Amino acid sequence: MAYRLENLTWDIRKALSLPPGEGLRRLSGRAVRYARRLRNRRRVTHLSDADLLTSMTSPASSLAGLVARRREKVPLVPASLHCAATAGLLRDLAPAAFEPILAAGRAVADGTFDLLGSGPVNLGPNPDWHCDFKSGKRWDRGAYSLEMFHTPDRGHDDKVPWEISRLQHLPTLGMASTLTGDPVFRERAVSHIASFVADNPVYRGINWNCTMDVAIRASQILASEGFLRGAGDERFWGELLKSLLLHARFILDNLESGPVRGNHYVANLAGLFLCGLGLPEFREAPKWREFARVKLFSEMQRQVTEDGLDYEASLSYHAFVTEMFLFPALMESENGGSFCRPYLERLEKMIEAVAILLRPDGTLPQIGDNDDGRFLIFSQYHRPRRDWRPLLALGAYLFRRPQWLRLAGDAWVEGAWVLGEPFLRWRDSLRDLDDCPGFPCHAFPEGGIYQLGAGSIQMVVDAGSVGQRNNGSHAHNDTLAFDLYAFGREVLPDRGTGVYTPDLSLRNRFRSSRAHNVVQVDGEEINPFPEEPFRLIPADSPRVLRWRSSQRYAYLRAEHVGYRRLRAGVLHRRSILMDHLKGTFQIEDRLEGKGRHRFLASFHLAPCWSVTLLEQGWTARSQEAGPTLNFLWRRRPEASRTQVEDDLHSPSYGLTQKARTVRIEWEGDVPCRLRYELTLLR
């Protein structure tokens, strides 16, 4: 699809909804990208053997000579060359870790994938790389990729072909071949790569539309190389090197570096750095590596707060971006180099944030968007994408933090497969690791996230802005919302994400104020929705008034002014007092301003929880055993009505489940306040 009048109209309307300076920057960014699309139409889309050979630092005399030279070099992931030795050591140390890898390898070799909420789907020996197999939509493989514009709200999802084309299953196939001695697994991996390269010429089709996915794919192929050596012939490896060279050139020529930058740009830079590190034969590689190194540090300073949180107002994206910053530093270290100290210090804070907020099952609260994105996957392809324990295993080794390795649980084997014997020697030197102390109380004041923790109980409160310098690309209307987890179960969770562009009504439903544990005024959103799926118009201006934590108590008081824009404006102030010993939360909501308003307070229960309404509150219980939640009124609004509604919960991208929500409605004058107690019992 070409850039049409309706695209221009959309861009102008979007720009006019922004402050004048920001709108001008957006339109100028569009103009730059339009010029880039025209310029890149002339880019090389195919390389001959001669083109490849003359691109080398030391030209080889033939393709056979180049491939032979490549096979003698250490790959991007040095330990991958010794995966058979790693497997031998793990047979004694972690025998239970093998079967999940083998099961995932068998499924993929059989053509079965489970991505973005699809459930297991058989896609045949080689997937249709241009198809959203969930909806049946297929994109034109010959279309110029930079002029393939998104068509939201039509039921199909371009994330599906992007996701499978990241090729994140390749290491699993290589490891399955190592564990079984069966070459069929490696042959299937080679078949998938060859099929993708042949069916996806550069600048053609949906899989060259998003530079982020190009960068992840190139990085994943390079990270998989050592696990796949010994498979494929000379022609295969020659064509693969051509494709990787074109991948790196595409990334550099199509950086997602507009005026509003986020995780996409970080992925571009991380991928370009790994191409520079993993393809040293090419003359261009030093330029890729050093350009990306400088820009990664710049984006670390720009996109990560001093207390270690990514600035996009999403905890899932925080962990995703942490992976992107981690792997260049980790692979550089494994290849004998190092990033600068300020970069590493900020990266350590990012991983520390994951460790603080992580739950025993490896998940994080779904504050903000979650699209199941991962940067590089090695031995843990079988794990749910929300399980971030493999990240802690790798971070533990880079920074020598034993407690993170303890939090990684059985995912510690990721470190063995990626880092090999040095990781195992370090782990063995630790001997007994201390037990995890439970959830601590911790504040991330710049990121706006506050954790009130006590042992097995965790409440996380979002008191931050919409993020991304007020763009709100991946934020939700969850200002002052809390997410409650206790005794190994979600209790009052964030409702999740649902999907992005396939269904905009579902997208807005899951990011709405009504979908979070907040107080809503007059049916309005805390921050208004613009006519686009990846932005919020900031109105809330949240402010933390007090934060205190002691051995017995934790206390948070914060406010937002998102409803001040109403004709009769309202300020919402929420106070939360946690008693560590009793496991109780005393919560007060003050609504100040003038006039008469309609109010709605929502309490979203996890799936499989039932509710019993009582005269002085309500009680909720998990139908799968576990904790009980008691809600007790301390100060109840006059004429309030409590009811229980059927609702939807999204545990991961593309997946929804039935759940129940308690709604408390009332109408009255402000100022007013309500006060209640939440008690958790085993």
Image (cartoon, rainbow, N blue to C red):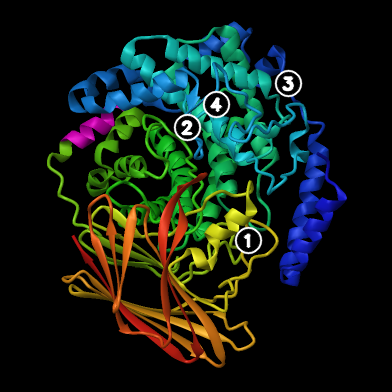
Q: Amino acid under label 1?
A: Arg
Determine which residue is flagged by label 4: 279
Is 227 or 5 nearer to us in this picture?
Answer: 5
Q: Residue at x 71, y 66 (%)?
A: 22
Q: Where does residue 563 sit, x and y in percent of width and height?
A: 57, 80
In which quarter of the view is residue 57 placed? Answer: top right
Q: Where does residue 158 sit, x and y in percent of width and height?
A: 64, 39
Closer to the observer: label 2 or label 4? Answer: 2
**Above or below 341: residue 199:** above
Q: Where does residue 536 sit, x and y in percent of width and height?
A: 61, 65
Q: Where does residue 270 sit, x and y in percent of width and height?
A: 53, 41
Q: Residue at x 62, y 33 (%)?
A: 132
The disc, 3 or 1, on the residue closer to the chain's N-terminal end is 3
Determine which residue is flagged by label 2: 114
The crowd level at tag 3 (other Cα within 10 Å; few <14, some 14-19, many 20+) is few
In this picture, which residue range is highlighted in magenta? 420-428
**Above or below 644: residue 502:** above
The disc label shown at residue 535, or none: 1
The disc, 1 or 2, on the residue closer to the chain's N-terminal end is 2
Is 407 or 632 nearer to us in this picture?
Answer: 632
The disc, 4 or 3, on the residue closer to the chain's N-terminal end is 3
The disc, 3 or 2, on the residue closer to the chain's N-terminal end is 3
**Above or below 365: residue 109:** above
Closer to the observer: label 3 or label 1? Answer: 1
